Amino acid sequence: MGKILAVVSQKGGVGKTTTVVNLAAAFARRGLKTLIVDVDPQGSVRYGAGLKKGHATHGFADYLSGQRPLRDVILPTSLSWLRVMLVGSVSDSADHTYYATQIATGDLLPKMLEAAVARCDIVVVDTPPGLGAITRRVLESSDRVIVPLQCEPLVLQTTPQILRGIQDVVSRHPGLTFDGILLTMYEAGNPACERTAEYVRKHIPRSLLFDLVIPRSAAVSDAFAAGQPAVLRAPADPASQAYVNLATLLAERFAK
Ligand SMILES: Nc1ncnc2c1ncn2[C@@H]1O[C@H](COP(=O)(O)OP(=O)(O)OP(=O)(O)O)[C@@H](O)[C@H]1O
Ligand SMILES: [Mg+2]
């Protein structure tokens, strides 16, 4: 039986999707059978996961609405150990109410995750920003959770709120292990970023924070724009190496 790893954060744009695709690719490169599941109606995974040319665009929402069987929404990538379940047609629509209600009130999300994890070593779930109904439903079924935190001065104000959110999530879901807060888009030599990281290290307990940070790197956003995880397109880049190191650390933890 594998593990379900959710990547969540109260804030948007902090590097959740980037973390999902790069970690998942790094797990797959280690020979772990990995599935990315995108439940975020924004559907960003589709652009950066290394899907094959001309891939189908249906996904979880189409399974949820009964339009597609589960096997149809699991897509291959350039890596044989990495598959992807996109969020599907809901990402083409502006109104996500029906999708969110189906997830909140039905049991197809936990059932899908249960079926997926029975066939995989790791299922990595990309979630919408915030701790709303969709993310909470994912956390109910997850074994582990990571919270990316963008290295920016606003963190000084939002850290207490972030810690409260994590406490709330962990206390509600006894089956869930909190793996850590991951500092993303870290810029060495940028005084504001260095001060922020220092503040975070001082105010967040060590057990809740990964020692390693993900550097800000053009290779990460360039790779995403080119449809690939950076760990595959620019493996020597420091951000790619940080994601590979994070995958190694997590794979060792999960194996215990
Ligand atoms: N390490 C990095 N270096 C440079 N750019 C990055 C890095 N991580 C993320 N980005 C860029 O920051 C932006 C936000 O990243 P991403 O889409 O992963 O965030 P998100 O938390 O998933 O956002 P949302 O909440 O909208 O889903 C993207 O343009 C992405 O390419
Ligand atoms: Mg995202």
Image (tube, rainbow, N blue to C red):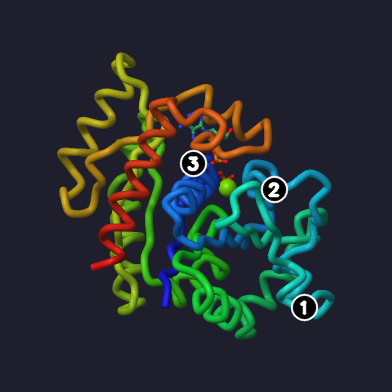
Residue occupied by mark 3: 15
Q: Helix, strand, or loop for circle 2?
A: loop
Residue 64 image position (x, y, % from top left)? 73, 76
First reached walking from the N terminus: tag 3 or tag 1: 3
Residue 68 image position (x, y, % from top left)? 81, 75
Indicate left or right for 5 with 54 as reference: left
First reached walking from the N terminus: tag 3 or tag 2: 3
Total labels: the figure holds 3
Residue occupied by mark 2: 51
Indicate left or right for 214 with 133 as reference: left
Q: Quadrant of the N terminus?
A: bottom left
The amino acid beneath tag 3 is: Gly
Q: Is residue 115 above or below residue 29?
A: below
Residue occupied by mark 1: 69
Residues at circles 3 and 2 in contact by the CB criterion of under 8 Å:
no
The amino acid beneath tag 2 is: Leu
Q: Whole-Å distance between the Cαs marked 3 and 1?
A: 30 Å
The amino acid beneath tag 1 is: Pro
Q: Is residue 12 above or below residue 252?
A: above
Q: Quadrant of the C terminus?
A: bottom left
